[in-house]
Image (cartoon, grey):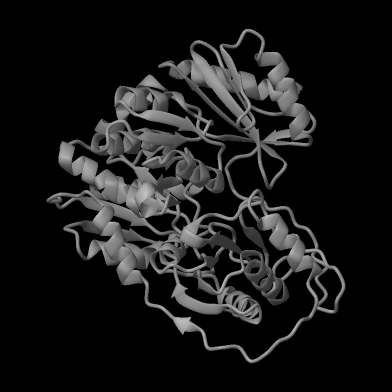
Amino acid sequence: MGISGAGVRILPDRSPSWPRVESDVLGLAGQRVRIDCFKAYDLRGRVPDELDAEVAYRVGRAYAEFLGARRVVVGRDIRATGPMIIAALTRGLQDAGVAVTDIGECGTEEIYFATARWGFDGGIVVTASHNPPDYNGMKLVREDARPISADSGLLEIRASAEAMDDGERGAPDPVTPLAARSDYLARLLTLADLGELRPYKVVVNAGNGGAGPVFDGLATTLPLDVVRLQHEPDGSFPNGVPNPLLLANRELTAAAVRDNGADLGVAWDGDFDRCFFFDADGRFIEGYYLVGLLAEHFLAREPGGRIVHDPRLTWNTLDVVRRCGGEAVLSKSGHSFMKERMREVGAIYGGEMSAHHYFRDFSYCDSGMLPWLAVLGLMNRSGRSLAELVDARIRAFPCSGEVNLEVEDAGRMLAAIEARYAPGAASVDRTDGISIEHADWRFNLRSSNTEPLIRLNLETRGDEAAVRERTAELVDAIEAA
């Protein structure tokens, strides 16, 4: 499935390659500056080239002024630059009149939890998730952990930060520390439906991100036999970036599952808002099939409920939800869109094939801890392995997994593919990129928000050979476009 045409090449994995743009932030001297670390859903950039203390200060002030916030909770992941960024961010918040509470080192979902649990006007976590150690960033939410994206305030915050003048800088009030983790862990266990749990053997790989201590806090209450890999938080990421979607990062977990005769393998990204699964044979289970599995779990508890899903891969989810008597609701991909759609329709659960899972009872937010607890509960109650829970669905709707293609002009490429494959199609949907369905196969092709990439996902009705053939055909068509 090689690529030889000009302007297109297939990437070997999903490693992030954020565009490097020089920042011309020169200090607060009344002149307009440019800040280039704002993305579609968050802020992310190299430190100090794209994100430094000056940018963090500006963002703090602009965020507070945009929300009219008076009480904001902050936290940071395990990166070495976190203390510097959060100190400047905090001062910016304080100079805008905000009382700041700090929960310390945490994962993204802990800020979601704290914002909603204690009624803050907003929350900010300093994190760059699975990006390399020289990156940092921020994820911003407002009251009740509602997301702030480019469609709901990030652009306004950026404009305000860029236009900011020096302003008054008085003596700030002390930051209030908050030990939030015990309440957070208790909430997770309240939401988990584990029953009288069997003593499962579980391999966990935190990738030297922040998941290890949180997992340990949960595991101390559970009868698990645990094999820990890359468990200690280390912001230098000595074993590589914590991104289980990279093929090279999967084998360690897979081999440990096989070598230890484990029942399950779980791995997380750096800020552990995503988790990934391996069955007892060490096979990586695509996140797509977890969406269907968890949808079935929640619909068994609340028949007739609504399930929100993304458009990249859909047939399995639609089939499961229909069979379980629920209502499937389509949303554009991305955490802010998924959360907003879930709130609109009162969905009990939402899932993306990218391993983001959203829970109504967790403030409609994504969590990387609730999914593995839910899967263990399903295994425990059914007496079945993870493979037995998903194998029939994988056979019924085999998929390509996400194929990333680098292109020079994503818009032109998408238009060319639509012109070729839309005629005679059963349906064409443009909710997110283009989704084109034929009787026995469908695909979604969408451009990246941050890179010169298009992302291809393809599935069939029970024909694994056709997945390979159609995927190769689409790649060749993109090459020729």
The N terminus, quarter of image: top right
Is residue 14 depicted above or below 56 in this figure? above
Residue closest to the far bottom: 171
* Count of marks, rendered view: 0
Q: Is residue 67 left or right of residue 118?
A: right
Decide which of 40, 378 is in the foreground and name it: 40
Q: Is residue 37 visible?
A: no
Q: Is residue 189 above or below residue 94?
A: above
Q: Position of residue 451 (x, y in %)?
A: 70, 45
304 with respect to 462 (left or right) = left
Residue nearest the viewer, comparing 396 with 204: 396
- Residue 462, percent across and down? 40, 16
The residue drawn where x is 64% and y is 33% is 446
Above or below, comparing residue 293 to residue 426 in the picture: below
Q: Which quarter of the image is occupied by the C terminus?
A: top right
> In the orientation shown, which residue stands out farthest toward the right?
31
Relative horizontal placement of residue 264, taking residue 427 as reference (left or right): left
Asked whether the viewer can see residue 426, the reply is yes
Q: Determine whether 460 is above or below 150 in the image.
A: above
Q: What residue lies at 36% left-to-right and 22% top-to-bottom?
A: 395
Q: Position of residue 381 (x, y in %)?
A: 16, 41
Q: Which image quadrant for residue 169?
A: bottom right
